[in-house]
Structures are given as C-alpha cells and as structure tokens.
Amino acid sequence: MTQTYKNFAPGLHGLGYDTTPVSGKAPILAGWQHRPDTALDYEQHASRSIGVLLGGEHNLIAVDVDVMNPFAANAVEKLIEDSLGQGPRRIGKAPKFLMVFKTDQPMRKIKTAVFNIERATAATDDDGCVEVLAEGQQFVASGIHPDTQRKYSWPDDSLMDWAAADLPTVTVEDVMRFVEAANNLLSNFGTPKRSAREGGSVPSRALSGLNLKDQSAPSDEIDIAVCHIPNEDVHYDDWVHMAHALKGALGDAGKDIFDRWSARSPKNDTDQNDRVWQSIGDVTRVGAGSIFYMADRYGFDLAAYRNEKRATVTPPPAQSVQPQFDPDTGEIIGDEFDAEPFKIGRMAGFNPRSIKPRRWIMDGRYIRGKVTLTIAPPGVGKSTLTMMEALAIAAGKDFGGKETKIRGRVWIYNNEDDEEELHRRLVAACKSMGIELADIEDRLFVNSGETQPLLVAREGDRPSETIITDHVDHCIRHIKENKIDIMLVDPFVETHTVSENANDAMNRVARAFRHIAQAGDCAVSLVHHSRKVGGGDTTSYAGNADTSRGAGSVVGVARVAQTIYPMTRKDADKYNIEDERMNRYVRLDDAKANLSLVSSEATWFERQAEFVPHGTLGLSGDYVGVLKHVDLQPDEEAESNRRDEYSLLLRTAWQYVDEDKETTIYRVARSMAWGEHSDFIQYRVERSDAKTVSNTLKRMLKYAAEADVEWASQGGYCSIGITPDGKKIYRITRGI
C-alpha cells in the first residue's frame, strides 16, 4: 500500500505547509481547519492523501481553474500568468488545474460566476468557473484523483521545490482584479448558469444608474428581472434572500412571483415556500435593488427595459374572435382553439430507423441549416479558400481532401471587394481548379458590398440596443427564390455596426445568420478575423476557435469552425521547408465540429498565382492569388539531424546531475537555465527561467527516449518508467 502521507507530509511540514490527511478530496479529521496536532501523526495516516491547508501564517491561496474546455483553461492560465505570475501548478483532471500563491494579507475565498461551457472535443457542456481558495479551505497536493484514479501531478516544480515563505506573493487587490477579468474571460466561452457565492462573484457589468438601496419598483420590472435569475440548484441562503427581497419590494403581492421562481427548482416544496414567506416580517433592508443586482449578472439590462417600456405604445384592447362554422357540416373553419399553446412531445411509437441523415453539402465543412465560421488573420488567404470551397460545391467537385456531397447553388456576398476584383478572383480560382466558369454560371450568384452593402444588424438609439435589419428577410427571400444551397459572407465584421466585444449584441448578430440558414434551408459560411498574434507565433492558434476576434458568442452559434494560419518555424522544420518558402504555405485546421469528428491533422495549401488575361487578345493581365492543396510529409533526414542535436544537449544535461544520483528533470533544468554552457545557450531566451528550460528539456528527453538516442558513453543515461496508471516518467541518471 502506498504510504503517501507518511512519506511526503513531513517534508511539506518542514517547508512551512500545514497538512491534513484526506480521503478522496475530503479531510478526515474533525476540526481540520484549526490545524489539530493529530495531523502530525504521520504513521497513523500513512496511506492517506495529503491535503494542504490555505490561509495560515503565510496567507496561502490556490487559484482553482475548474474548466474542462482546454482552450478556455489555457486562456485562464495565460491570464493568471499575466495578472499574478507563475506559481506551482497541480493537475488532477486535465485540463483543469490549480496554482498556488500567497497574499500580502489574509483574504476570504472568492469565485467567478459559474458558466455553462461547451467542451471543445465533445457535444456536451460542463459547469466551469475559477475559484480562489483561501482561509478555511484546503487542496489535495498528493494522492489519487477520485475521478481519474490517477495520481495528482505537478508538471513543473512541486511544493517540495518551494518553501511556503518563498511562494510568489500577490496583493489582495491583484486577486480581486484577476477574478473580475476571469469572469469576463469565461463569459466569452459560455453563459452564466447560477449565482456564485462568496465571496460572491463579480457583477457582469455596471448597473445603469441603479441605486442598490432602492426597495420598491413596479411589479412588471420585478417580474421580468426574476425571470432572468436561474433556480436549478440555488443555495438555500440565496433562496431565502430572494424571498426577503421580493417581500421588501412588493409586500405580499410578491408571493406569486416567489412561488413561480421556486417552482423552477427540482427541490421545490410548496409547503416550505409558504412557511418561509410567513416567517418573514417587515423587510426594510432589501428589495428591488437586490433583485436587479442578481438579474444583471444574468444579462438583464434594467435601463434598456425601462427605455423600451417608455417607447411602447399601449396596444388597443384585444378583439374577441369567434370561430367560424361550416353551415353544412357544423365543423370549425380555419384555426382550432386549443387549450394549450403547444403539446408535449412523446417518444412512444418512435422508430429509430426514421432518423434522416445529416444534410452535408461538403463533408465536415458545410451543412444545411447551420453556420460555419472560418477564422484567420489578414492576408493568409481565407477569402480565397472559402471562395474556392464554394466554387467546388457549384461544380460538384471535391476540394482540399473533403468530399462535396452535392452540386449546389452558391451565393457569394463579399462586402470588401468591388465587382471587378471579385470577377478577377473567380476567374483565377476556376482556372486553378480546372472549372469552366460557363459550366457553373447558372449556379453562381455574386454580390459586392461596394455596390450593395449587406447590413444585418446595427446599434440602436438606446444603450445596449441591437436592431436586426430587414436585410435578413431579404436574404431569406433571395435564397428561397434562387434555391441557394450555400451563402458565403465575407467578411463577417462588415455585416453589422455593433461592438465586436459586446457578447449579447454579437450573439444576436450571429443568430441572425443562423436564422437565415434555418429559414433558407441552406448552409451559411461566415469569414471572420482572428485576434492579433503576439510575436508572430501561431503555433497554439491553429485549430483554436477561441482565437476569433471579439465576443466568443459568435463561435458559440456556429456548429462548424475552421482556422487558417501560416506555416510556423516548427512546421517548416517538420517538413524541411526552407525559410524563403515558408510564407508560401498555410494550414487549414478543424477548430469546432459539433456534428462530426474533429480531425487532428492539418490540411496544407500552397499559395500560387494564376494569370488572368485582359482584353480580347489576352496579351496583358494580372496574376491573382489562389491556393493549391498539397500533401506535405515529415522529412526523415531533418528528424535524424534533430536526433543528433538532442543527443548533444542531453550529454550537456548529464553534467548537471549529482554524482551517482538519479534526479528530476526540473532540478537539472534549474541548473541549466542559469548555466553558461555553449551547447545549451541557443535554447535560452531573454529572461529565461527554469520553467522554460524544463519544458525544452522534457521535449528533448521524450524524443531521445522514443528515438533511442545513445548518450550513455559519457556516464549518463535517460530512462522511461511506467506508472500503474500508464503515465510515462522520464529520468536523468549519472552513473551506471
């Protein structure tokens, strides 16, 4: 039996950490928060996992990133590093992680709102949040994760490499600002699900002129605000607080709203509702202000509602409509008057064989009734690629390794280029693809935004107002009249005038295009810009839908997303592409595929040019850019050179290992980071630290071990160990 607590807890205690024995994730000692002496009985708790207490002498905190979407988790990790720095990082169930710091003064726990976030690799959603654990809490530092049944890991340096007093120190103010930023960041990946207790969460935005001390408000405002507040698994204290707030705002007239809100919970108990309501006396401290504050966190804009209410003309009284009867049969003519607005859907008698196949237009790319998003930085060829995909559909030809399912009718709406340039590019693309323009002209419809701008949404006169224009209905009418199979809109940013970073507004714009796709029974392709790439390195951007510019709600509406990025130095090394030819290649990656499998392999295209002649004789013309699908294969000779280079660096690493001692990668890397050996200096960067070198060394060790690199002649060697859970461990050893 593994004696985790006995073997490692004393060492952590010696480094200034308070430990407690844990089963699963839960401490087993009564009063563990008060650090009882029984926690020091290492023999008695020998086989337990190790919990580390927070707060205490050093004001320890742990930033717990409880997010299963890897892109969201990576984004939060970068935010932590930018806002707080780099602390020891623990992983239990990846991509979730936890990072340890200490603060300049004691603080209470705090967390973001809980968001419903879609997984990147599965058609399921998960609750996700970021919580700063503090005094009165603990985290598991070593042991077996109850879900994965694998050991908790510390990818870089563990707590055993840090004295508690030496942990990175952050201010409480920095932590508060980080939580607010994390709340805003996660709102780009999902929607708030429930209230976050506190600590409490940071409000989603400033309340427009609302005095939180206001107790009363019109019942319609209270009613609509409460509709925005979820009640799936609300905390009991929050539920009671809602009762007080409603009674403070409306008196006993608020009971009906309270009952309707409570009924949305699976734990609803009408008798308990009555008892709690009757127990509340006169309320003087809470009311409408509290309700509006809670509703604001879930998207309710009080000011916008009030403006809309003021602008609304009171409609005339409804006229009583009597059914008309057929004089011969006595049956009702026209609409029947149902008692219910809709009927419950029953699965009884359903035949699974009646399910129709998904209606793909191009396999994995475009499907009827759905939106596809293509994300790329300027100048890489996103307009060219999407146009060529559309032309392939018009011709019924496969393209870029993807099967075209139909020979369809295509509508290209380019809001950037004039008609002449569009025609020039169409001719070049057809020439490159071996398509005769005359063969598809009756299937091809082209509009230029310079002549007829497409504007589906604009900002309203009131704050936070987004108006969907009649262009949406015009698009649907043209699609139906001309039997369009796919509509290409390029670029998406030119089709609206709302703020790109306003999540609610951009959600409405994206949904307008989804409505076009559904009502027109066609696929809609939106071409969208990516964020600016720091330092020119796009390695982590390829296949990442969350690199799209502006609000994340656009990605949420799309069912398919693809990215286009230029070749990186790493890609060029892999395929042995010379520096002067790198800019000729771009990669297309699956970034989101709710309705199909996401491919892990990039599709490569080479930039080429086609000559488009002018005039009758065609003696002059222009060279127009196109993309040619190419099959790049890894270069074996380059791999061999890399093997030799890594062998040299590993022999260098050997020199930093203590004699006759096996040691960890990180300890070697820490020495190498600040060493002056010429063989390693090329891998160092400005302000290099142990983590940077450690990650490089890990890649070298992994490659060397898998490629059977020999470096034992100098008296050192690397080895691979396999843990019971199948995880690889790489070791460096001096002495045979």
Image (cartoon, rainbow, N blue to C red):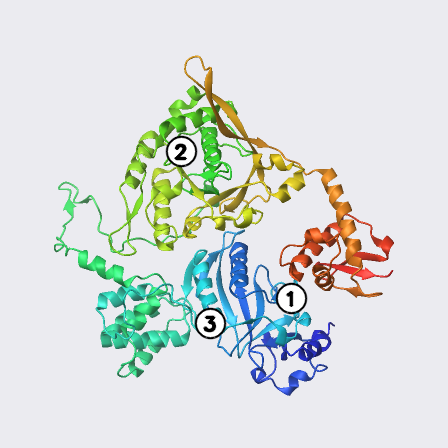
Residue on which disc 3 sits: 173
Q: Residue at x 42, y 73 (%)?
A: 235
Q: At label 2, which amino acid type do we have?
A: Asp
Q: Is residue 289 above or below residue 155?
A: below
Which one is in front in this view, the residue at disc 1 or the one at disc 2? 1
Lower position in the chain sequence, tag 1 or tag 2: 1
Which one is in front in this view, the residue at disc 2 or the one at disc 3? 3
**Mark 2 near mark 3, Cβ–Cβ under 8 Å?**
no
**Mark 3 near mark 1, Cβ–Cβ under 8 Å?**
no
Residue on which disc 2 sits: 485
Closest to the observer, 154 or 726:
154
Q: Residue at x 51, y 79 (%)?
A: 106
Q: Secondary structure at mark 2?
A: loop
For the residues labelled 3 and 1, the Cα–Cα distance comes to 30 Å
Lower position in the chain sequence, tag 3 or tag 1: 1
Quarter of the image where one finds residue 46: bottom right
Residue on which disc 1 sits: 152
Which image quarter holds the N terminus?
A: bottom right
Percent x, y of residue 47? 70, 75
Percent x, y of residue 474? 28, 37
Q: At label 3, which amino acid type do we have?
A: Glu
Residue 541 shows in the view: no
Q: Is residue 600 above or below residue 109?
A: above
Q: Secondary structure at mark 1?
A: loop
* Left or right relative to 174: residue 58: right
Q: Is residue 312 above or below residue 363?
A: below
